[in-house]
Amino acid sequence: MRLTLEEISELSTESSFERGQEYFQEGRVTDLKQFGDMITATVAGTKDYEVTIHIDKEDIEASCTCLYDWGCYCKHIAATLMALSEDYPKIEEEGKKEKRKAVYQSQKFP
């Protein structure tokens, strides 16, 4: 699922969207990976925060290890959604490769 900046801004407060955009542009989102309908990333802030996003056809649920509790999504999630939108085809392909690799390894015999 590729979100537009407008859609990401609707999921965030104005402040968290703006800060998330700064974090994204500064390259603070790393280790962006997809496992089926789950995306994980690490976002560097005052410390490293772990972001988890579950995407269903039209539904997004996200969580972050930061203490943000102001409604909508935090800057770390906003930054991750921006990175996801930017690199989605590459991330999706890597996720498929990892899934195939896991299936292959599970079929190996000792």
Image: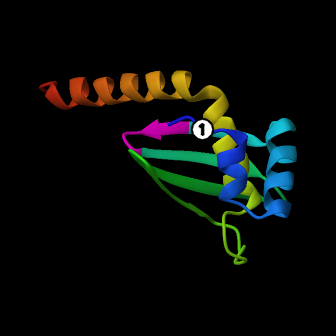
- Counting every numbered tag in the picture gives 1
The colour style of the image is rainbow
Nearest the eye: 44 or 7: 7
Q: Taking 58 as reference, is 73 left or right?
A: right
**Residue 44 on the magenta segment:** no
State whether residue 34 is above or below residue 60: above
Nearest the eye: 70 or 65: 70
Q: Which residue is mark 1?
A: 32
Within 10 Å of disc 1 (Cα), the crowding (few <14, some 14-19, many 20+) is: some
Can you give x and y, in whole percent of width and height, for residue 89 in the image? 53, 22
Identity of the residue drawn at 73% across and 53% down: 9
Can you give x and y, in whole percent of width and height, for residue 23 in the image? 83, 46
Identity of the residue drawn at 82% across and 45% down: 21
Query: What amino acid is labelled 1 in the image?
Result: Leu
| Residue range (magenta) | 33-37
Identity of the residue drawn at 68% across and 37% down: 83
Question: Which quadrant is the C terminus positioned in?
Answer: top left
